[in-house]
Image (tube, grey):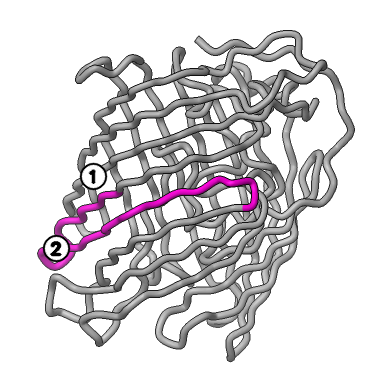
Amino acid sequence: MTTRAAVAESPSQPLAVDPQAATVPGIDPTTMTEGDAGRPASRSVTPLLAPIPFKNSQLGWGLVLMAGAIHRFDADTTLKPSTGAIGGFYTENKSWGLMALEMARLGHDTWRLRGALTHMDVRYDFFGIGEDAGDAGVSVPLGQTVDVGIGTVLRRIVPGFYGGAGVLWMHTTVRLRDELPPELTSLDTDLGETDLFALGLQGEYDTRNDDYWPTHGSLAVLKGWFFTDALGASRQFQRMLVGWSWYTRLRGERLLLATNLNAAAASDGTPSYLLPSLGAGRFGLRGYTQGRYRDQVMTTAQAEVRWHSRGRFGAVSFFGFGQVAPDLGGLGEASILPAGGLGLRYKLTRQFPMHMRFDYAWGKKENLFYFSVVEAF
């Protein structure tokens, strides 16, 4: 079981750049964004080719290259389409990865099938576990090789509500890239080789009028992953995620309000790299380096005012807060970690309201610049 690192205080971090891009995979497959297929299109196949430069506070400068297609299994063009893609990324700290994914809608969107295969070799800094470790900001340089296969099947139960199951396999090796810093007196970060296998239950309720830039409706997501020692796996633990986003118009079609509530919890025995953390995964809280604040329980709340011109440009203002704690009872004593910021938007295509986003966010210890595609929630 992972223990908490003993750390010393250090000054806050300077301005960094962190895109939190959906196109840059994280090491936590249970929070891997499954993507959105956008609004309906009249064409049966729309090619995708996206070379995207980025700078990440953990990985440095890098480039993502995605190639794929928005396509249809149904002839009905009033339905949202499916999406398939392959891609890879490389960064200046020599992290790299390859991925392939398919998000299929079948039977007039009665069935939603999603699958992904990923191989990554990433280098990042581990800050320890718990609020005190995040405040101290002392990190250990780690390298991690990750192979992941994940698949889910969801069926429409009533209009807007989908339920189903999933399976996940993960093989990973974690290694130290350098000696421990002198501020650390002890550390246990699940070093070595691990095989993980999980069965999952999932549900989602989606009434958004658009996946990329919704003006009304909501999206609720519930996921439970149950890791077992079956098929040669070496760990048993559970991980839960619940999130809810709500969208409404404030004035006409151009001024909107988007809100998000998010909570995640992991049981004893969860590897450190799969513990919930601020700033990581779907609905990540901007203003916090991914993984700096992590523990067995995490909650966040966010709100964003969105404005868009009649052309391609838009702007946003956002604020929120988060907490991490060793258990649910510890949330009452945990500090509230505030975040806020401003951003600009540029619409990439005329057909889909997909945006390039530029966000400047501030948190408790650092300020971050985000350069990404698609919205934070």
Residue 371 in the image, given as x and y percentages of width and height: 64, 63
Question: Viewed as shown, does residue 123 lie left or right of 235?
Answer: right
Query: At 75% across and 9% down in the image, what residue appears?
Result: 185
As drawn, 320 above or below 264: below
Going from N to C along the chain, the mark reached first, 1 or 2, is 2
Q: Secondary structure at mark 2?
A: strand
Q: CA distance from mark 1 to mark 2?
A: 13 Å
The front one of 249 and 225 is 225
Query: At 37% across and 71% down in the image, what residue appears?
Result: 38
Residue 97 is inside the magenta segment: yes
The front one of 154 and 280 is 280
Question: Viewed as shown, does residue 290 lie left or right of 139?
Answer: left
Query: At 60% across and 79% down in the image, what residue appears?
Result: 346
Q: Secondary structure at mark 1?
A: strand
* Predominant SS of the magenta segment: strand
Q: Which residue is mark 2?
A: 106
**What segment carries the magenta color?**
92-116
Q: Which residue is mark 1?
A: 152
Under mark 2, the amino acid is Leu
Residue 181 in the image, given as x and y percentages of width and height: 77, 20
